[in-house]
């Protein structure tokens, strides 16, 4: 699904990405973690076609990325800025579907179906500012789902919500992936989250970042916020990722 070759990016004289090589299989949920300022969001924006890297190549299904691919959706951390406050929840979710040339009725139906999938079927007529932060992020996820992408990018999507809501949204992502089988790359600074959600965790070094760890997560499904986090394998993986993020020898 995704192939990254020798990716580098600099902002002026400051090199952020120092040479990233990565492959992601179709249907995989990959989490990317690393220290603050290591270029995680720069990497995601490059994959999404929102930023042209200084050097290297990104391919999705074998096609070089030049602009945002049609089969890709992005969920950002700052949901309050990604939703239009003057539009209803349903209209926010339906907005990207205009790009597909769908009729108004079909856009409305798809939006309501997506809202139902994230547990917000009763909020269609409300406005984003009438919802809690966690509900607004659900709307952002619903908007991505309505587009029916094969590939979803998530840039620290739960960083602005409380701990309980964060856990609920983590479970929602696992549920969505289970239903749709889409490929997901999730950027996070939360080590526990990366292990709980991911099939695989890639760890970046400090800038200029390189991949310093690539761990397979073999935790059983379905995952549970209490039972899964108590498993010895979860504890081991969390410690391994933590050491890599901090640059501590194993």
Image (cartoon, rainbow, N blue to C red):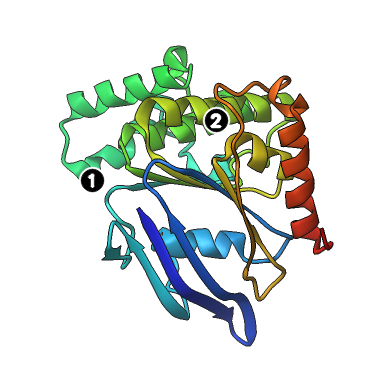
> If you read the primary sequence from the N terminus, does the residue marked by circle 1 or circle 2 appear first?
1
Find residue 30 and report its horizontal and vertical position in percent: 52, 47
User: If the image is split into quadrants, where does the C terminus sit?
Assistant: bottom right
Q: Tell me, yes or no, if residue 181 can be seen here.
A: yes
Location of mark 1 (residue): 99
Left or right of residue 167, residue 110 in this image = left
Disc 1 element: helix
Quarter of the image for residue 107 reads top left
Q: Which residue is drawn at 45% across and 43% down?
A: 28
Which residue ends up furthest to the bottom in the rendered image? 13
Q: Front-most of 39 and 143?
A: 39
Q: Front-most of 29 and 119?
A: 29
Q: In this view, does 156 lie above or below 86?
A: below
Disc 2 element: helix
Q: Residue at x 54, y 40 (%)?
A: 199
Q: Residue at x 56, y 46 (%)?
A: 200
**Numbered tag placed on residue 136 in the rendering:** 2
């Amino acid at each position: 699904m995704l192939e990254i070759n020798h990716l580098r990016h600099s902002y002026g004289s400051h090199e952020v990405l120092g040479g990233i090589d990565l492959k992601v299989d179709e249907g995989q949920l990959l989490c990317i973690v690393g220290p603050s300022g290591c270029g995680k969001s720069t990497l995601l924006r490059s994959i999404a076609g929102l930023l042209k890297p200084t050097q290297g190549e990104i391919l999705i299904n074998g096609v070089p990325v030049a602009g945002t691919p049609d089969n890709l959706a992005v969920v950002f951390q700052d949901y309050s800025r990604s939703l239009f406050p003057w539009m209803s929840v349903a209209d926010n979710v339906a907005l990207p579907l205009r790009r597909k040339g769908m009729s108004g009725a079909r856009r409305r139906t798809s939006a309501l179906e997506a809202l139902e999938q994230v547990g917000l079927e009763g909020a269609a007529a409300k406005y984003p500012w009438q919802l809690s932060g966690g509900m607004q992020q659900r709307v952002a996820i619903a908007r991505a789902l309505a587009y029916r992408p094969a590939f979803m990018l998530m840039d620290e999507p739960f960083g602005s919500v409380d701990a309980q809501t964060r856990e609920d949204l983590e479970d929602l992502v696992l549920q969505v992936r289970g239903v749709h089988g889409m490929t997901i790359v999730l950027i996070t600074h939360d080590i526990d989250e990366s292990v709980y959600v991911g099939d695989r965790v890639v760890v970046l070094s400090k800038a200029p970042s390189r991949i310093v760890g690539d761990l397979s997560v073999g935790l059983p499904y379905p995952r549970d916020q209490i039972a899964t986090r108590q498993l010895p394998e979860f504890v081991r993986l969390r410690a391994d990722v933590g050491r890599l993020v901090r640059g501590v020898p194993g």
